[in-house]
Amino acid sequence: MTRGGEPLLEVSGLCVDYGFDDDAVHAVIGADMTLHRGEVFGLAGESGSGKSTLAYAISRLLRAPGVITGGEVIFRHEGNTVNLLNAGPTQLRELRWNQLAVVLQSAMHALNPVLTIGTQLTDVLQAHRPELDRQARRTRASELLEMVGIAPDRLASFPHELSGGMRQRVMIAMALALRPQLLIMDEPTTALDVVTQREILNELMDLRTEFGFAVLFITHDLSLLIEIADTIAVMYAGRIVESAPAGELYLAPRHPYAYGLLHSFPGLHGAQQRMTGIAGSPPDLRQLPTGCVFHPRCGYVMDRCLRDEPPLARPAAEPPGADGRLVACWLHEAGASAPAELAALAPALESTS
Amino acid sequence: MTAPAGLDATVSESPLLEARGLTKHFPVRGATNGRRGGIVHAVDDVSLVVPSAGITAIVGESGSGKSTLARMLARLIKPTSGELLLDGQTCTAALGGARREYARAIQLVLQDPFSSLNPVHDVRYHLARPLKVHKLASGSLDEAIDGLLGRVSLTPAANFTGKYPHELSGGQRQRVAIARALAVAPRLLLADEPVSMLDVSIRLGVLNLLADLREKDGLAIVYVTHDIASARYLADVVAVMYAGRVVEIGPAAAVTSEPAHPYTELLLSAAPDPGRARSVPARARTAPPNLVTPPPGCRFHPRCPHAMRVCTSGVPEMTQISPGHHSACWLHVNGLDTQQRTPLVSKPGKEA
C-alpha cells in the first residue's frame, strides 16, 4: 500500500542552522527523503535530533534564529511542481492548509482559548473557501467534527471545555478541513494517555484510508512508528542515519543507533531479560564528535569512523531488489563486514523469494 | 505487630511499608460549574503492602492518582483518611524526630530532574545537604559524596562534584537526584516517573541503575509510571491504578500476560507494541472519568466492555485470582444473581 504511490514530497540535501556563521548550530544536515502519495512516513529521533526542525523547514514554518541554508523541498500536486523553499508568500498561502497541513504537539496551545471550536473551524473555511456561505461553513464544520468522532454540538465549546484527546481530535479535524495531500504531525499524541493515543491513531489511520492523504509523523517513540508507519527514517544529531520500510527496520535494522534504539523499548512479551540500551548520551550539537557523529556511543566503532562521516547510502550487502533502505554507516560499505545482528536478512525478502 | 490486612500480593516477609485505606480528596473551586465545594477524589481507599525488598510498580494514566499516592507514601501530603505503617508501626507524628526517621527510611525521586535540582548549587552541595541535615557524615564528607556518585555510575566523581545542574545531561541529572535520595541510606526509594522526561536512549540506563540498586544493595523501590512495558521490565509486582483506586495487583509477569481487570487489558492493548500483528480493535470512545463526580460503583464501568448491572452500584472488592494476584472486578466475584449479572446495554457513545 506504500511504494506504489508517486512521489509527493522530495527533500534533498536540506540543511538548517540555528544562528549564523561561527555561532551556527547545524540542526539538520543534508536530509534526503521521499514521501509517496498516501504513505505514512515516520521520522524518529530523540530530542535535539532535528526531527521537528526538519518538519518546520519543510512547511516553511521555521522561525528565526532558524535559517534554511541549503537543499530542495519539491512538492508535487495536481501536476504542478513547487520547490517549497523558493515559494513566495502567495504561493505558500495557497499551498498551506489546502495541500499541506500541520498538527502540532500541544493542541492546548495551538487552539485559541478565547474562541469557540466552531469559530476556529469556520475561520479556516472562510479564509480558504470564500465560495462557501455562512450556513455551508457551519455544516462543513459539523461534518468535520463528526468525522473525528466529536458530537457537532461541541462547536459551541471553548477549548478548555474539551479533554486533551478531544482537543487533539479538533486539531486533526481542522488540519483535514481542506482535504490536504500531506499532513505533517509533530508528536501529535505525546501529551496524551496511551488509551487516548491508541484511539486517535486508529482514527487517523481510518481517515488516511478514506481520504488518501500522506502523513509525515514525527515522534520519539520508535515502537509506535513501527506499528503505524510505512517507511521510517531515524535521525541522530541532525542527520538521517537510516531509512527503511517499517517492517524491515524493525526486524533487521542496519545502523547501530537504530538497533540500539529498538532495543531500548522494553516489550510486553517474551522473557523479562535485561536490555542494554545505548551507552552514553546524545551529543551537544555545538561540539559534535568528528567523523561519524554516533561513534562515541557505538559498539562497533572502527578507525575510519573517527575520521570520516559516512554518507547515507544503499548498504553494499543488500540483496538486489531491496531498494527501500539507506543507511549512513561504514559497516555497510562495500568490502566491510557488518556484524551479524546488523546484517539480518529482511523478512519481506525471505517471504517473497 | 498485627498481621497485614488488605493485600499481601508479594511473597511477604514482614512488610516495610503498608498503606491502609489511604484516601486523598482535594477541595476545588470552579470545577463544578463555578460553584464552590467540589472535591477531587484523587485517591480513594488504597491499601498497598510494600515489601522490604524488590520493586513494586504503580501503573496508571495521568489523573489516576499514582503520583498523589507516591506523595502520600513519602508523607509530603497528608492523607484525608487512612493510615501508613512503617515496620508495622502507625506513623502519626507530622513533625519532629519521628518525621525525620521516616524521611530517612523513605526517599522520593521526582519526575523532572530539571526542576528537582537547585540551579544555583553544584552537585557537591546537593549531595552534602542530606548528609548534614541527617548528621550522617561520619568520616569524610568528600568520601561519602564520591561513594554516592559511584553508586549511580557517575565516575570519576571528581568530574561531577563541581558541576552545576545546567552542565549535566538529563540522565546525569536524574542520577544525581537518585544519589541525593541514596545519601541518607533509605530503605525504600519512591521513584515517581523517573525516566519519562529523559531521552529514549538513556532511559534504559536509569532503569538498569534502579535494578542494580535492588540487586546489589537490596533496596526496596516503588516505581511509579504510566508505561506498563517498563513496569513489566523493572518490577516484581505491578499495581494498576484507575481513577484513584488500585484495580489490579500481582506479579509483573502475571499482570501483563494474563490481566484480570478489563482496564489492565485496555491499557495493554493500547500500549505501543511493534511485536503484535497490526490493527488493534478500536474501543468505544470514552475518556477517564471526572474525579469531582466519579461514577458510582466501579469507576471503570462506563468504559468497560463487560459492564454488568452490579458494576453501577457496588464498588468491587479485591478478589484473589491466583496466589498474589488480585483484581477488583465484579467479573471475579462468585455468587452474583442473574439480575446483578445483566450486562449493561453498551451504547457506543461518541462523547467523552
Image (cartoon, coloured by chain):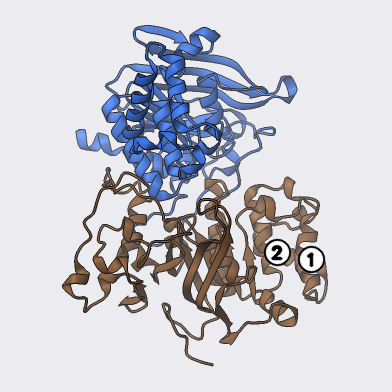
Chain colours: A blue, B brown
Secondary-structure class at tag 2:
helix
A229 lies above or below A77: below
- Quadrant (top left/top right/bottom left/bottom right) for the N terminus of chain B: bottom right
Reading the image, the residue beneath label 1 is B129
Answer with left or right where residue A16 lies relative to residue B303. right
Secondary-structure class at tag 1:
helix
Q: Is residue A274 visible?
A: no
Task: Report x, y in % for residue A289.
Answer: 65, 35
In which quarter of the view is residue A286 placed? Answer: top right
Write the residue at 38% across / 15% down. A133
Q: Nearer the viewer, residue A233 or A275?
A: A233
Q: What is the CA distance from the residue labelled 1 to the residue labelled 2?
A: 9 Å
- Hey, what amino acid is under mark 2? Arg
Answer with left or right where residue B60 lies relative to residue B273. right
Task: Tell how many labels.
Answer: 2
Write the residue at 27% across / 43% down. B279
- Tell me, for residue A263, which label it has, or none: none
Furthest residue toward bottom: B1
Answer with left or right where residue B334 lies relative to residue A189. left
Answer with left or right where residue A85 lies relative to residue B333. right
